């Protein structure tokens, strides 16, 4: 920016102008008297406040009451109808335009809300609508007319006949005002579908004929546009006898607007005429329109170009070959209209006329592009290359963006119609992909997968590779389109393009995708700043990886994803890695994810950024869903270990809250079982148990044969000692059991109810070890996910680092309390064992003394 002296004075002048502009704003502040007049007593209810504002308030306050009318009708309909609505009716007589427009909208809203019955509505609101529908302001009149036409749809026939149709006869007379006659025309078109044919013939059609002969061209134009609705209400016969003659006469009217309305109505009613009417009446009129459009009546040219496709196909059966060729040449002429004009005039008026003509010609060519699929049907797709390809080329290369945009939208329809001849428009596809306008590219991309599929599978060549070679510029065009979208500010177009590029594995080879597109997707994920674009690129990259069958290329991409995203320096890249993993779980098999991405995902539990850990917690239920037991039991153990670390070591409150919520969600999930692996392990376990049982039986047999005598003597002594000590031992067991029950009940009360089975878990894990218990997943899977997490925490309580953390953090108070309870329980158990041992030694001494005394 240049801060020179001249520019600086210019900036000062601009600032002075701004201060001048602001001065009236300061002067327009409300005075205390005005504020006093705008103040309303707060103790008034809604009805009283509305009446007060309508009576003594300013216009803006009255407008707010009218806007709030639907709310009052919902809250208190009886009082609103009795007190507020009459006051609104009174105020509307002198109200301004703003209040009138607001009232029209509010009345329509009350009808749509169905706050009152239609009978009550017609009794209370209809008369107000009819009074204001002929307002002197055209905008207000149209607003009330729209409300009236909507009300007519809901009113019963008798009400319409007495309140609307009967007054319509007098309102449509030539003696009435222009506004009244225009309103009557529109109401007639609406009433044509509400009554029987004989009523329309007797009461409405005479008024229609009268209005078609009206002296004002606005009235003739208006009634001409309503003839379509009237024809649909009276049927084919009356249309031919009454409506068609009026249309023919209006098509020759002196007013260009009337002729235009007659032409458009004629085209819309084409299906209601038989072949004779089309040949004898419609076709001569259409030919006359086409001949005059270039010479004396250019006003109809835009409308003619818009309806030409429908017109040609509607009259197709009655065309002679000469007429068919004439209409085709007329269409070709319209497609190039204005492209050969020279605008090198010096006269300003001529230049303005030329600009107006140029805008009109652009609209004509745009309409021709819109009708191009219909013209393919008109000439037959087999004759496309001979008759229409040159026009198709011109429209795709048109200098104006709206024309090319329309061709891009209709390109898919053209490709479908050409079917096996679609190969003829491959160059134009490349042209539109390389178009300088992103609007054209956005329009084309919408159906790009379908277009490319037709290009590959619809041609006449044999194999897909041969078809691919026939579009040599396709891949450069696709890459150019993506780069142009990436450098623009229209990120939605870029996102849409990347989503559609996921179809490329069906179109081109995996090597071409790998070298031209796959690495580009990874670059977008790493460098682009728009999240939807990054996600679209990540999903498309996963699709490319899914269809790539070369292991070395796959491993390279996987390694880059893990290193550059999962282990990237930017936390934003690590977040995108989790998004990519989610797409991988969607597109790939469970085993693929477990093999390559399961552990890298779990490593993010140590991520220093809380947002990454939060996103990981949200992803963990999906991660668990890919596991199969017992195949992935070691991965399940790693998952539980990560959850344990998050529960024990997490300092961020938000993350800890989500972790606890995730644990509950994981607890409700079921792990899928691998039936084949279970059957294999079952057979292996059965073979191992049989071998172990045979060895044990053989050892026992040898031991019995060797020490038969000594074993019998030992058995007698054991029997004697057992008889003497049985009572003491049983008493000790009962005492021990009661103490254990008391300690367990105490610990259960001290802990959260969710973790009441922590002792059970600790006993199991201390006996066999949690790691070894996973080898028999039948028992450990009986425990819930949260219970297994608690077991892991309980077994690690003796760890010094964890003991220090548990005493320092209040969030883990339950684990420290459980450790103290467990220590007290162990001291109880050791005391019981000592007592039981003392009792058993005393019983043995007593039995020895008894044997000595007996001897």
Image (spheres, rainbow, N blue to C red):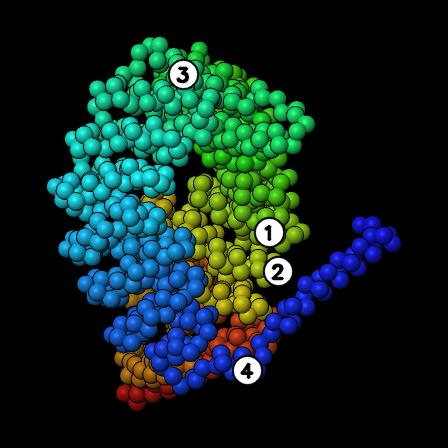
Q: CA distance from mark 1 to mark 3?
A: 60 Å
Q: Position of residue 101 (x, y in %)?
A: 40, 60
Determine whether the residue tagged by mark 2 lies in a helix, strand or loop: loop
Which of the 4 image quarters holds residue 772?
Answer: bottom left
Front one among 667 and 613: 613
The local crowd at label 4, few if under 14, some if 14 to 19, many if 20 or more residues have their Cα within 10 Å, is few
- In the picture of the structure, the residue carrying the numbered disc 3 is 328
Q: Is residue 779 visible?
A: no
In this rendering, the answer to whether 143 lies above or below 297 is: below
Residue at the spot 71% in from the left edge and 64% down from the top edge: 20
Q: Tag 4 or tag 3, which sits nearer the N-term?
A: 4
Q: Tag 2 or tag 3, which sits nearer the N-term?
A: 3
- In the picture of the structure, the residue carrying the numbered disc 2 is 609
Q: Tag 1 or tag 2, which sits nearer the N-term?
A: 1
Q: CA distance from mark 3 to mark 4?
A: 75 Å
The local crowd at label 1, few if under 14, some if 14 to 19, many if 20 or more residues have their Cα within 10 Å, is many
Determine whether the residue tagged by mark 1 lies in a helix, strand or loop: helix
In this rendering, the answer to whether 90 lies above or below 475 is: below
Proximity of marks 2 and 1: CB atoms separated by less than 8 Å: yes
- In the picture of the structure, the residue carrying the numbered disc 4 is 33
- In the picture of the structure, the residue carrying the numbered disc 1 is 574
Q: Is residue 571 visible?
A: yes
- Between disc 3 and disc 4, the foreground one is 4
In this rendering, the answer to whether 522 lies above or below 267 is: below
Q: Position of residue 798 (x, y in %)?
A: 55, 72
Instruction: Judge left or right: residue 678 versus residue 233.
Output: right
Residue at the spot 56% in from the left edge and 29% down from the top edge: 358
């Amino acid at each position: 920016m240049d801060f020179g002296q001249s520019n600086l004075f210019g900036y000062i002048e601009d600032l002075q102008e701004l201060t001048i502009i602001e001065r009236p704003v300061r002067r327009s502040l409300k005075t205390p008297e005005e504020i006093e007049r705008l103040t309303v007593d707060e103790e008034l209810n809604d009805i009283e406040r509305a009446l007060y504002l309508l009576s003594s308030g300013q216009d803006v306050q009255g407008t707010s009451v009218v806007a709030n009318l639907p709310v009052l009708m919902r809250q208190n309909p009886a009082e609103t109808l009795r007190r507020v609505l009459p006051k609104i009716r009174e105020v509307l007589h002198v109200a301004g335009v703003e209040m009138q427009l607001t009232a029209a909208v509010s009345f329509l809203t009350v009808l749509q809300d169905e706050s009152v019955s239609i009978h009550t509505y017609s009794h209370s609101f209809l008369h107000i609508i009819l009074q204001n529908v002929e307002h002197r302001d055209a905008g207000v009149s149209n607003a009330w007319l729209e409300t009236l036409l909507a009300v007519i749809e809901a009113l019963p026939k008798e009400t319409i006949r007495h309140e609307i149709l009967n007054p319509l006869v007098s309102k449509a007379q030539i003696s009435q005002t222009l506004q009244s006659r225009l309103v009557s025309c529109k109401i007639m078109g609406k009433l044509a579908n509400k009554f029987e044919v004989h009523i329309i013939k007797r009461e409405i059609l005479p008024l229609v004929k009268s209005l078609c002969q009206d002296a004002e061209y606005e009235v003739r134009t208006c009634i001409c546009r309503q003839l379509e609705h009237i024809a649909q209400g009276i049927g084919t016969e009356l249309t031919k006898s009454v409506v068609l003659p009026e249309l023919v006469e209006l098509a020759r009217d002196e007013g260009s607007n009337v002729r235009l309305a007659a032409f458009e109505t004629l085209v819309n009613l084409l299906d209601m005429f038989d072949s004779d009417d089309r040949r004898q009446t419609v076709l001569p009129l259409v030919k006359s329109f086409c001949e005059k459009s270039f010479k004396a009546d250019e006003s109809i040219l835009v409308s003619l170009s818009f309806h030409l496709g429908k017109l040609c196909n509607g009259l197709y059966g009655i065309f002679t070959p000469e007429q068919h060729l004439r209409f085709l040449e007329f269409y070709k002429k319209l497609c190039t209209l204005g492209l050969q004009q020279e605008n090198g005039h010096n006269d300003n008026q001529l230049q303005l006329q030329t600009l107006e003509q140029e805008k009109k010609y652009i609209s004509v060519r745009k309409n021709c592009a819109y009708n191009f699929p219909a013209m393919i049907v008109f000439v037959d797709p087999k004759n496309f290359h001979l008759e229409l390809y040159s026009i198709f080329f011109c429209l795709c290369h048109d200098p104006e963006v709206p024309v090319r945009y329309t061709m891009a939208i209709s390109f898919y329809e053209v490709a479908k119609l050409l079917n096996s001849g679609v190969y003829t428009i491959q160059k134009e596809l490349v042209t539109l992909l390389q178009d300088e306008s992103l609007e054209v590219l956005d329009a084309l991309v919408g159906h790009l997968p379908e277009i490319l599929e037709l290009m590959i599978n619809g041609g006449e060549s044999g194999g897909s590779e041969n078809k691919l070679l026939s579009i040599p510029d396709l891949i450069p065009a696709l890459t150019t389109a993506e780069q142009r979208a990436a450098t623009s500010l229209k990120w939605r177009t870029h996102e849409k393009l990347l989503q559609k590029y996921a179809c490329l594995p069906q179109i081109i080879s995996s090597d071409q995708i790998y070298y031209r597109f796959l690495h580009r997707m990874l670059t977008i994920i790493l460098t682009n700043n728009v999240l939807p674009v990054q996600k679209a690129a990540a999903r498309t990259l996963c699709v490319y990886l899914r269809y790539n069958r070369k292991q070395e290329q796959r491993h390279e991409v996987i390694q880059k994803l893990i290193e550059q995203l999962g282990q990237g320096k930017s936390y934003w890249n690590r977040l995108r890695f989790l998004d990519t993993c989610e797409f991988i779980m969607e597109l790939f098999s469970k085993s693929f994810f477990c093999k390559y991405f399961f552990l890298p995902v779990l490593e993010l539990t140590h991520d220093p950024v809380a947002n990454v850990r939060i996103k990981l917690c949200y992803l963990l239920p999906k991660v668990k869903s890919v596991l199969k037991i017992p195949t992935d039991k070691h991965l399940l153990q790693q998952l539980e270990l990560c959850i344990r670390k998050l529960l024990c070591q997490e300092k961020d409150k938000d993350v800890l809250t989500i972790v606890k919520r995730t644990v509950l969600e994981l607890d409700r999930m079921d792990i899928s079982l691998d039936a084949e692996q279970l059957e294999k392990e079952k057979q292996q376990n059965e073979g191992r148990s049989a071998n172990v049982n045979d060895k044990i039986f053989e050892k026992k047999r040898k031991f019995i044969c060797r020490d038969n005598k000594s074993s019998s003597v030992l058995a007698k002594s054991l029997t004697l000692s057992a008889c003497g000590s049985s009572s003491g031992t049983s008493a000790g067991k009962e005492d021990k059991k009661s103490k254990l029950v008391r300690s367990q009940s105490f610990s259960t009360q001290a802990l959260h109810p969710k973790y009441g089975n922590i002792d059970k878990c600790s006993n199991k894990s201390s006996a066999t070890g949690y790691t070894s218990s996973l080898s028999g997943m039948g028992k450990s899977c009986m425990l819930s996910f949260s219970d297994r997490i608690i077991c892991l925490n309980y077994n690690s309580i003796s760890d010094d680092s964890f003991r220090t953390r548990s005493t320092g953090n209040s969030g883990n108070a339950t684990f420290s309390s459980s450790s103290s309870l467990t220590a007290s329980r162990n001291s109880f158990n050791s005391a019981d064992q000592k007592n039981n041992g003392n009792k058993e030694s005393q019983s043995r001494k007593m039995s020895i003394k008894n044997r000595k005394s007996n001897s």
